[in-house]
Image: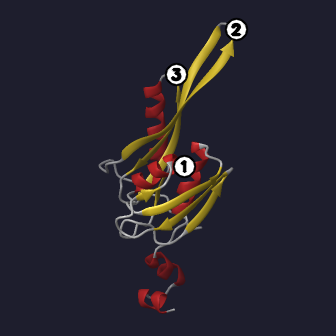
Amino acid sequence: MAENRVKLSSDTELKDRLVAINRVTKVTKGGRTFTFSAIVVVGNEDGVIGYGLGKASEVTAAIAKGVEAAKKNLVKVPVYKGTVPHEQLAKFGGAEVFIKPASQGTGVVAGGAMRAVLESVGITDVLAKSKGSSNPHNLVKATIKALSEMRDAYMVAQNRGVSMEKVFKG
């Protein structure tokens, strides 16, 4: 798999989206201590996506930490006419995702955690199915893994060292 990490300049506008928030309780001899963990997805809605996990004693602080973590691991994803270039299957942990291109006007047909990732990357028409675990952490990671493994025709031509016409010929 080609490494497609991306570094963005500070003027790039990234929109963050909260995928899931979890309250964690730790029992100590002084009583219960509540902390929050938040998984956040950031994207510029033009092919760049990242996810992060933030943990803190307050929800807003956890979300802020998640956004900072997400900005540190951004990946570039090929988006072709508002959809994905081809079908892709990916697994992470117990979560398995299947992403399939859709015709214009279909919309994003996907469940919660997958929908947040696909909309943040700028995909407007796609068919997606999650199988196995519905854990939002693993679903986000599996979806980003599937998207980062996608290759458009330009990348295929570049990898093979041939012209674009030869890729489509055969």
In the rendered view, tell whether residue 15 sits above or below residue 45.
above
Distance Cα–Cα, label 2 vs label 1: 36 Å
Q: The residue tagged with tag 3: helix, strand or loop?
A: loop
What is the x, y in percent for residue 83?
A: 41, 66
Mark 1 vs mark 3: give the one in front: 1
Q: How many marks?
A: 3
Would you call the spot at circle 2 few (<14 residues within 10 Å), some (14-19), or many (20 or more)?
Answer: few
Q: Amino acid at mark 3?
A: Ser
Q: Earlier in the sequence, mark 1 or mark 3?
A: 3
In the rendered view, tell whether residue 129 sits above or below residue 1.
above
Distance Cα–Cα, label 1 vs label 3: 23 Å
Q: Amino acid at mark 1?
A: Val
Residue drawn at 47 percent across, 26 percent down: 59
Identify the mark at residue 57; answer none if there is no mark: 3
Q: Which residue is mark 1?
A: 140
Q: The residue tagged with tag 1: helix, strand or loop?
A: helix
Between residue 116 and residue 79, name the one nearer to us. Answer: 116
In the rendered view, tell whether residue 162 sits above or below residue 72.
below
Residue drawn at 43 percent across, 27 percent down: 60
Tell which residue pokes out farthest to the left in this image.
11
Coloring scheme used: secondary structure
What is the x, y in percent for residue 100?
A: 51, 67
What is the x, y in percent for residue 62?
A: 48, 30
Residue drawn at 35 percent across, 52 percent down: 9
Q: Earlier in the sequence, mark 2 or mark 1?
A: 2
